[in-house]
Amino acid sequence: MAMQPSVLILDEPTSQLDPIAASDFLATVGRINRELGTTVLMTEHRLEEVFPLSDRVLVLDEGKLLCDGSPREVGEQLRRAGHGMFLAMPTPMRIWAAVPGDLKCPVTVRDGRGWLKTYAEDHSLNGETAREPAPPDGEAVLTLENLWFKYEKDLPDVVRGLSMTVHRGEFLALLGGNGTGKTTSLSLMAGLRKPYRGTVAAAGKIGVLPQNPQALFVKKTVREDLNEILKKNRLSREERKHKIAYAARLCRLEELLERHPYDLSGGEQQRAALAKVLLLNPEILLLDEPTKGLDAEFKQVFAEILEALLRRGVSIVMVSHDVEFCAEHAQRCALFFDGSIITQGTPRAFFSGNSFYTTSANRMARGLLPSAVTTEDVIRACGGKVPSRPSLPPEEDPPFRAEEEKTSPQKLPLWRKVAAAAAGTVAGVTFLKSVGLIRMRGVLADVFGTQYGAY
């Protein structure tokens, strides 16, 4: 803005901001538009707060213009068309679309509250939400005890006395503001950094999806990158080909396999990095902002992938600012502040009643449905139809299970090794003498360090 532009172009500017920072940023953009008259063109996947600011919305699909109009008009067009892009619409609009009726389409949380109040006057609401399954409490696979970490000796601590336990088959989401130590804590769990105090204990193979997916790309094409991660496995060429093909289908990379990873969009890079990590068959999966840049439709696929991993006993720790995704899919949520966890609980207990770290569904419905935290909670309470989730591609041979250990060759006794080495030496010397290249006496002198007479 120091250059006083007449047009401001923003490409997913809130993708890595926490909810409070994202709200402040968008409020600033709104003021720039209103008070300076600057034209703002913004691409976004997080539409809850962007939609109300917009005068006009354009929806692109496969490089073509799908819809063009006001936020409400675009929402109604996508609903009538039954298009997958409707999943990206704000929560009030998706709830309105799933509940029968002829009321006006809401766009903002305020509109949604008014819509729900009017709907409740003529219909009874089911205030009972589905019971949440308790997080697994069996075998601990990742334990952190009193971790302290700083990047340099004279700098303040980034992680302060962090203690936590993750159990087998558990999905733990870590939320909190930017700079509170979440990513640093994830690197401590992965063993990429060492705390100066405290201990980390992990039982199982760890896979890490970093915040910057480009850190995982080392080859010139996506296919070569996926193949590279399997080179250390004792797999045949056909087995590697099958696993790569399945990973490509799962993460929707079929059309991108021959592209350079750096030429992909942010969301496409995220999907390619996810496929590469999954091919490692991790038992503990650490994810840093995995949903940033992903469209709403693939987020549902991603959620199903995580569910499939959980059923196989994989433990997942995810750092995220995506409050809606965490509320819907995590088993336990924890809030980071000043280098440690200050509160945690199930998604319903964690998000209910909060002002900032909560979902649009909870802000919209808390007056009538205090315990509702997800879009599905409100839809069910209104008697609407919950949209079905996508199914994963069928697996002929599950590619992300732990590989069976190959039988290692039996070790030879020491005496057998010595005898074999001696026999090899004598055979070599005899061969060299026979062809007249060296004399036996010279060989014995070199081998034993002694000059011998006639042999």
Image: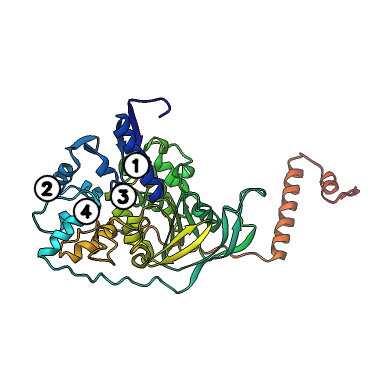
Q: Amino acid at mark 4?
A: Pro
Q: Which residue is mark 2?
A: 80
Q: Position of residue 362 (x, y in %)?
A: 28, 60
Image position of 394 with respect to 128: above or below: above
Q: Of marks 1 and 2, which one's residue comes earlier in the chain?
A: 1
Is 336 on the left or on the right of 257, as rendered? right
Work out how far the residue at label 4 is from the one at label 3, CA to CA, in angstroms: 32 Å
Is 144 on the left or on the right of 293, as rendered? right
Work out how far the residue at label 2 is from the one at label 4, CA to CA, in angstroms: 16 Å
Q: Amino acid at mark 3?
A: Arg
Q: Quadrant of the rendered structure where residue 191 is?
A: bottom right
Q: Amino acid at mark 2?
A: Arg
Residue 27 has which mark?
A: 1
Q: Position of residue 220 (x, y in %)?
A: 44, 36
| SS for callout 3 | helix
Residue 92 has which mark?
A: 4
Q: Is residue 43 visible?
A: yes
| SS for callout 2 | helix
Q: Nearer the viewer, mark 1 or mark 2?
A: 1
Contact, mark 1 vs mark 4 (Cβ under 8 Å) = no
Q: Pick the residue in front: 116 or 448.
A: 116
Q: Residue furthest bottom?
A: 138
Please tell me how crowded label 4 is: few (under 14), some (14-19), or many (20+) other residues with Cα within 10 Å: many
Work out how far the residue at label 1 is from the one at label 2, CA to CA, in angstroms: 31 Å
Q: Nearer the viewer, mark 1 or mark 4?
A: 1
Q: Nearer the viewer, mark 4 or mark 3?
A: 4
Residue 249 has which mark?
A: 3
Q: How is the image coloured?
A: rainbow
Residue at 17% from the left image edge and 44% from the top image edge: 72
